[in-house]
Amino acid sequence: MVSFIATGQTKPNATLDKNKISLVIHGGAGTITRQNMTFEKEKAYNEALNQALQAGYAILKKGGTSLDAVEAAIRVMEDSPLFNAGKGAVFTNEGKNELDAAIMDGKTLKAGAVASVTTIKNPISAARAVMGKSEHVIMIGKGAEQFAKEKGLELVDPTYFRTETRYQQLEKIRNEEKTKLDHSGGSGSIRTPKVKDPDALAELIFTEGEKFGTVGAIALDQFGNLAAATSTGGMTNKRYGRVGDAPIIGAGTYADNATCAVSATGHGEYFIRSVVAHDIAALMAYKGLSVKNAAEEVVMKKLVKLGGEGGVIALDQNGNFAMPFNSAGMYRGYIKADGKSEVLIYK
């Protein structure tokens, strides 16, 4: 039984509108093509994404909040070994699963995040606890785990997150002495930088990644409130306490009723540098762009110019949404007030 944590997201002084309730999710972007997808694998992803959509939609349909909806959708994907979040997260160079997550309330601008946690079964619920039951925004490592324990969240042995597929992925990369992003499929040539400059090495490292399995959800409820949530296991073979964009408010996760809710997936370093999620909201606020045009401006132009790969899902207060990505594919889906839903993978 999922136990959600109330954070004060309540109905505003406006007429309830169940006709606009919306939920949009993603399960990662990258080199996802029909050529490297089996029928069985595609079916499994479609089923998992649909399950996540239905979990969030059931809450919205019953009059629940957008915060409850995005948390529920994310938890489904965290519990699925298909994604790089929760069960099935990628391994660090040390052979650990280190998880990051964030959630944000568009009405109050309250936000919560956790990073580098190893024993919290559902990091998104821990992020929500940070938002609703502390005065902080981000907690990391052992401190975040201690906080989660005090708040009664479910803790597990670190071995819970392990899957053999992910571990073999790490072993393969270790043997090649290189770093890849999540879900690398090996279709591209291996580049081993013969340079000593750390910055140059870091840039070349990321050319080898093919898919990013971060999960995300954004929702609009009948009260007109937006919410965004993101969860990830980060980068395969990552070292030295690396944290990506997912738990960074304004980079991989952002929500503001005045503009939009955003969750991102992709090459985290570029999303942090570009403050992607907030930049989309800023383009709407200051230039008057639609959510579609703002999201495409950032993902298809600004990110591409810098060399960043990935995508976002974005949703405004009228139920309009966008799902742009500059990679070959992105696991994504949406469901509207009438229950009509669609799951997509390829361009």
Image: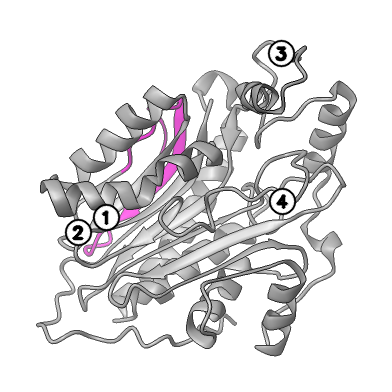
What residue is at 43 percent from the left and 56 percent from the top?
253
Residue 137 location, x and y as percent? Answer: 51, 72
Instruction: Describe residue 87's horizontal placement relative to residue 228 as left or right.
Output: right
Q: CA distance from mark 1 to mark 4?
A: 28 Å
Location of residue 111 with respect to 202 vertically, above or below: below
Q: Earlier in the sequence, mark 2 or mark 4?
A: 4
Q: Which residue is mark 4?
A: 88
Q: CA distance from mark 2 to mark 4?
A: 32 Å
Badge 3 density bin: few <14, some 14–19, many ≥20, Cα 10 Å? few
Q: For marks 1 and 4, give the one nearer the viewer.
A: 1
The type of residue carrying mark 4 is Gly
Q: Can residue 343 be seen from the camera position used here? A: no
Residue 9 location, x and y as percent? Answer: 33, 83
Q: Earlier in the sequence, mark 3 or mark 2?
A: 3
- The residue furthest front is 197
Residue 158 location, x and y as percent? Answer: 83, 63
Q: Which residue is mark 3?
A: 191
Badge 1 density bin: few <14, some 14–19, many ≥20, Cα 10 Å? many
Q: CA distance from mark 1 to mark 2?
A: 6 Å
Q: Secondary structure at mark 1?
A: strand
Magenta span of residues: 323-347
Instruction: Describe residue 183's horizontal placement relative to residue 287 as left or right.
Output: right
Q: Which residue is mark 2?
A: 319
Q: Secondary structure at mark 2?
A: loop
Q: Earlier in the sequence, mark 4 or mark 3?
A: 4
Q: Mark on residue 288?
A: none
Q: Which residue is mark 1?
A: 315
What residue is at 70 percent from the left and 19 percent from the top?
186
| Image marks 1 and 2: residues in contact by CB distance under 8 Å | yes
What residue is at 55 percent from the left and 18 percent from the top?
35
